[in-house]
Image (spheres, rainbow, N blue to C red):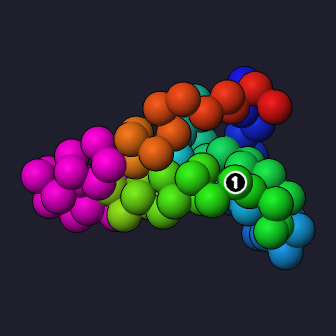
Amino acid sequence: MSTLISHHTYERAQGVIEARLLDTIRLGQGEPMQVYEVLGRKGQVAPDRAEAACLFTRGYAMYTQRHWDEAITSFEAALKPVAFLDFTT
């Protein structure tokens, strides 16, 4: 299970947590907002998980720029280092 936070919360907590941007969503008729997954405390995220988050971030950037092939490559690479990691801890 993951903890999701808004961009507002991320801005306030980024000094003590590591997180990755998941997507931009709209709740009802409200303004779009970015949603982040909390990875852990700053400096305490497992290297494989941090690497996967970086690859995902690159894939998301390519996706938002409509560079589909590069996005797919990054997303697929992001899955490899974390295939057997337990995200419930």
23 on left or right of 77: right
Residue name at image x 42 percent, y 53 percent: 56
Q: Position of residue 7 (x, y in %)?
A: 69, 58
Q: Quadrant of residue 3?
A: top right
Residue annotated with mark 1:
46
Can residue 41 be seen here?
yes
Above or below residue 69? Residue 3 is above
Amino acid type, mark 1: Ala
Which residue is more in the foreground, 65 or 59? 59
Which residue is more in the foreground, 27 or 51? 51
Q: Quadrant of residue 2?
A: top right
31 on left or right of 67: right
SS type, badge 1:
loop
Which residue is more in the foreground, 58 or 7? 58
The residues colored magenta run 60-77
**Quadrant in the picture for the C terminus:** top right
Residue name at image x 75 percent, y 26 percent: 88
Q: Position of residue 1 (x, y in %)?
A: 72, 24
